[in-house]
Amino acid sequence: KTSLATNIAFNVAKARLDHNRRGRSDDEKPEGGIVAFFSLEMSAEQLATRLLSDAADIEAYRIRTGDIRKDEYQILVDKSQELHALPLHIDETGGISIDHLMARARRLQRTHGLDLLIIDYLQLITASARKSEGRVQEVSEITQNLKSLAKELRVPVIALSQLSRQVETRENKRPQLSDLRESGSIEQDADIVLFVYREHYYAMMQKPDEKNVEATLEWVQRTGRIEREAEVFISKQRHGSTGDVKLSFDGKFTRFGNLEQRYD
């Protein structure tokens, strides 16, 4: 979920940067937007490493360990300068309260402008200081506040959420609305609910006994075929239709993209 959200944030911010650099006229509608990314789980450094890996086409683990060739080092320098110029603001405050998050979003809109707000992830936000009536009530308060914030600032808010462990026990691993943790308020308040699904993730857990050569060969072929595929399920859309979208996924760079369709 973080990978997809990071890809969205990067592409929205880059589209705005490219638009500004082209020097279009004032009456033209700007492309992309200014993005705020509240990363409650990962540090800003970890998130920046992912972005740099994607932009430079160099695996993140090699950047972390310093396993970089001389020619790649210059690429990293150039791409890091480009990333620095992106209208992408990362807040890495852990365990931030909903009140502080809303205040920072309002301040960012006043000072720099704001077109998209992303939160990774919902369950790590804390409720207000008043006495809580339980975690379900806390999440309900948080989702209601995020919905009102989206209306107040007139920007889309993407809030990532954990899934319950029920999906792990089912034969069909495809996520559904009931899998959302503390799902009542999340499902009710969200205008759109998207689920990310990669069949390859679960297929890797079903490796047959190597003594069964035929089954192993079939498993290798199947996992190889679906390794770079992902799906996004639109399970709820208040103002449109539901369905699924097939995407490509490159695990080396945690990058989602358009899936090349083959027609025989």
Image (cartoon, grey):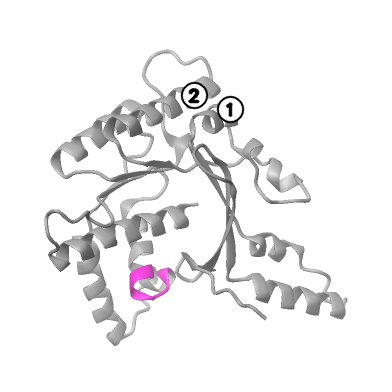
Local crowd size for mark 2, using a 10 Å CA cut-off: few (<14), some (14–19), many (≥20): some
User: With 264 as the anchor, is 114 left or right in this view?
Assistant: left
Q: Amino acid at mark 2?
A: Ser
The one nearer the camera, 215 or 192, is 192
Earlier-in-chain disc, 2 versus 1: 2
Where is the C terminus found, in terms of image quarters?
Answer: bottom right
Local crowd size for mark 1, using a 10 Å CA cut-off: few (<14), some (14–19), many (≥20): some
Q: Residue 159: name its quadrant.
A: top left
* Residues at marks 2 and 1 touching, judged by CB atoms closer than 8 Å: yes
Which residue is at 16% across, 45% downward? 112
Relative image position of residue 11 (x, y in whole percent): 34, 61
Q: Is residue 197 visible?
A: yes
Q: Is residue 247 above or below residue 99?
A: below
Relative image position of residue 214 (x, y in whole percent): 86, 79
**Residue on which the image places disc 1:** 184
Q: Residue 114: name its quadrant.
A: top left
Q: Secondary structure at mark 1?
A: helix
Q: Is residue 117 above or below residue 210?
A: above
The one nearer the camera, 93 or 199, is 199
Relative image position of residue 41 (x, y in whole percent): 42, 45
Which residue is at 22% across, 65% downward? 18
C-alpha gap between disc 2 and disc 1: 8 Å
Count of numbered tags: 2
Q: Is residue 250 visible?
A: no
Q: Is residue 74 magenta?
A: no
**Residue on which the image places disc 2:** 140
Which residue is at 20% across, 39% downward? 109
**Magenta segment, which residues?**
54-60
Q: Amino acid at mark 1?
A: Gly
